[in-house]
Amino acid sequence: MARLRFPLLPKSVRWFGVLGAVSVVVYYSLVTVPPAPPTGTTPFWDKRLHFAAYATLALTLAYATARQRDSPYRRAALVIGGTVAFGAVIELAQGTLSYRYFGWGDLLANTLGAVLVSVWFVAERRIRYVRARKLAAELREN
């Protein structure tokens, strides 16, 4: 079966994406005062935000490390473990702030979001990364 060609952006751009995701999580987790829940929302609306944020962070980290595919299980463990550890540190830091609190439910949502990236690692077996410039040039030729 042919592998799906997927664009691989330059390393600096990939890591800038990780920095962006980390910055957004830190800003909304530690810097801003948490908003009141929107009226008419479903239960656990904040847990959904945690889940989405940490799934995004883990995915950007997985993409940033796309060239290190020689040891996929080690890479997956580092990406997932690193994201979960980051989530735990953020939760512990929130516990020290007067306008935030540590929450086991938040930590669970962070962890589940990070674990979602394992779907990407399975799908990645069918992907062949191609440098973005090369792929763009090939598409222009066709």
Image (spheres, grey):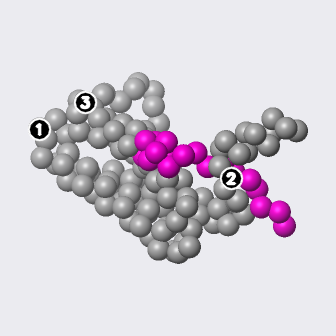
Q: Residue furthest right?
A: 142
- How many dots with numbers? 3
Name the residue carrying label 1. 98
Question: At 33% across and 39% down in the image, what residue appears?
Answer: 23
Where disc 2 sits, the SS reads strand
Residue 66 drawn at (x, y percent): 55, 59
How far separated are the C-alphas under marks 1 and 3? 12 Å
Q: Is residue 116 above or below residue 30?
A: below
Q: Is residue 32 above or below residue 133?
A: above
- Say which amino acid is labelled 2: Val
Element assignment for label 3: loop
Quadrant, the N terminus:
bottom right
Q: Which residue is mark 2?
A: 130
Of the numbered discs 3 and 2, the one sitting upstream in the chain is 3
User: Quick one: label 3, few (<14), some, or many (20+) residues within 10 Å?
Assistant: few
Observer-side mark, 1 or 3, equals 3
Give the label, 1 or 2, closer to the camera: 2
The percent coordinates of residue 2 (x first, y second) are: 83, 63
Q: Amino acid at mark 1?
A: Ser
Q: Nearer the viewer, mark 3 or mark 2?
A: 2
Residue labelled with disc 3: 32
> Which quadrant holds the C terminus?
top right
Q: Which residues are magenta?
A: 1-18
The kind of residue tagged 3 is Thr
Instruction: Decide whether residue 6 is among the magenta residues.
Output: yes
Tell me which residue sits at (65%, 44%) in the image: 132
